[in-house]
Image: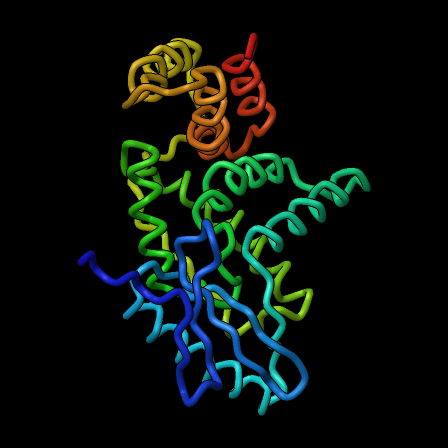
Amino acid sequence: MGSRPKPSTILLLDGDLKLYKRPGIRRWQATFKLKSRWVRVSTGHHDMAEATIAARDLFYKYRYMEQHGLPTLTKSFKTVAMWAMDRMREETENGVGKKSFRDYQIVINRYLIPYFDTLPIQSIRYEELLKFGAWRREKMGREPKSSTLNTHNSALNRVFDEAVVRGLLARNDVPVLMNKGRNGQRRPDFTQGEYQTMIDSFGHSFVTPPLAVKNPQEWFRDIVLTEIEPLLSEYWFDAPDRARDATARLLAGF
């Protein structure tokens, strides 16, 4: 006889909490009822034992939040991230946006949404951020520089800020983001010769893919906008126009 299939629905806490898997979804989901509404939330885990622990924690956390008047609405990270990008685009159109918003949106689309995706915004804690950091290193093929992590952290904070504004997350529940990337030497300016040397060096140290990539042009733009441009902005902190001009030259033709 073959092995018995694993159950797709599990009742916990005398039936007050249900753990289940939807077709095509690897992570276990949890559902339970508060006084005012039903909650359906991802546990963030593929393993049944880990999902069971996470589901119990979520159940008691939501009950506590309801009793103390804290936000209990849930939205996926992707949903909140899309709202955050809409807000950045709106601020840019109204003339109050920042040039860095473009970089934030690239980071959100290339790194944050692909990893966090359907995870509830409230469930992202320190442990999940550590896992994301390991995934990001593998995706990049290197330990990201400190300036790159600053950009990533700023983009992630924009998403958390959006969750706070919409009442999905309490400010005290926003995780503290760390920056343990490689440090780059800060310099105030370059001579023309040093500038040319720096650009030439990018061709070897930055723009050689560690693995085969499906779209080399898209990969190159990503490297320029998320790794090289932040470095140029640090180097020319007192001449932002020079940093933008150097970035434009690198992207010419792409």
**Horizontal relation, residue 15 to residue 137: left or right:** right
Q: Is residue 219 above or below residue 2?
A: above
Q: Nearer the viewer, residue 184 or 28?
A: 28
Residue at image position (36%, 64%) is 126
**Horizontal relation, residue 250 to residue 144: left or right:** right
The image shows residue 231 at horizontal and vertical percentages of: 43, 31
Instruction: Name the image quarter holding the C terminus.
Output: top right
Give the residue at the far left of this rendering. Answer: 1
The image shows residue 206 at horizontal and vertical percentages of: 34, 21
Q: Is residue 201 above or below residue 67?
A: above
**Horizontal relation, residue 39 to residue 137: left or right:** right
Q: Nearer the viewer, residue 104 or 129?
A: 129
Q: How many marks?
A: 0
Q: Nearer the viewer, residue 236 or 144?
A: 144
Instruction: Name the image quarter holding the N terminus.
Output: bottom left
The image shows residue 125 at horizontal and vertical percentages of: 41, 65
Query: How are the colours assigned in the image?
Result: rainbow
Q: Is residue 220 above or below residue 60?
A: above
**Quadrant housing residue 77:** bottom right
Residue at image position (33%, 75%) is 53
The image shows residue 239 at horizontal and vertical percentages of: 56, 28
**Quadrant housing residue 192:** top left
**Quadrant housing residue 58:** bottom left
Q: Nearer the viewer, residue 152 or 4?
A: 4
Residue at image position (58%, 82%) is 33
